[in-house]
Image (cartoon, rainbow, N blue to C red):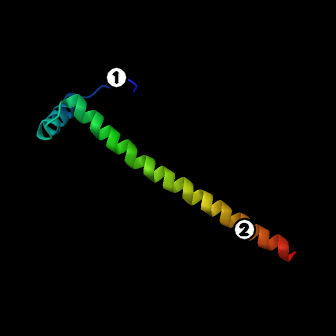
Amino acid sequence: MKRKLIDLDLETERRLSILASANGMSLKKYIEYILFQHGNDHLIKIEKEIKKQKSASINQLSILDEINKNL
């Protein structure tokens, strides 16, 4: 775990406090929760994009191999 100091404007802090309370969490715990959720969602998308790029590269290499065989 790493500690990070963040600055929030008063309105953002107020809104997040309301959401935290509505979810039965402290403000700190709620912010950690939403950042964790958001970070993991993007990790999945990044992994899928990397796999997609690797597949595209493999397909391009296969096409080049076929071209070279025909030459």
* Residue 35 figure quarter: top left
Q: Residue 23, relative to residue 59: is it above or below?
A: above
Q: Indicate the quadrant containing the C terminus: top left, top right, bottom left or bottom right.
A: bottom right
Residue 9 in the image: x percent, y percent?
A: 24, 28
| Residue identified by numbered label 2 | 62
Give the residue type that dot 1 points to: Leu
The residue depicted at 61 percent of the width and 57 percent of the height is 54
The residue depicted at 34 percent of the width and 22 percent of the height is 5
Find the residue positioned furthest to the front. Answer: 1
Residue 27 in the image: x percent, y percent?
A: 20, 30
Residue 12 in the image: x percent, y percent?
A: 22, 34
At numbered mark 2, what does the secondary structure look like: helix, strand or loop? helix
| Residue identified by numbered label 1 | 5
In this rendering, would 47 be left or right of 54? left
* Residue 2 figure quarter: top left
The residue depicted at 49 percent of the width and 50 percent of the height is 46
10 Å neighbourhood of mark 1: few (<14), some, or many (≥20)? few
Find the residue positioned furthest to the right. Answer: 71
Give the residue type that dot 2 points to: Ser
In this rendering, would 27 be left or right of 3? left
State how many labels appear: 2
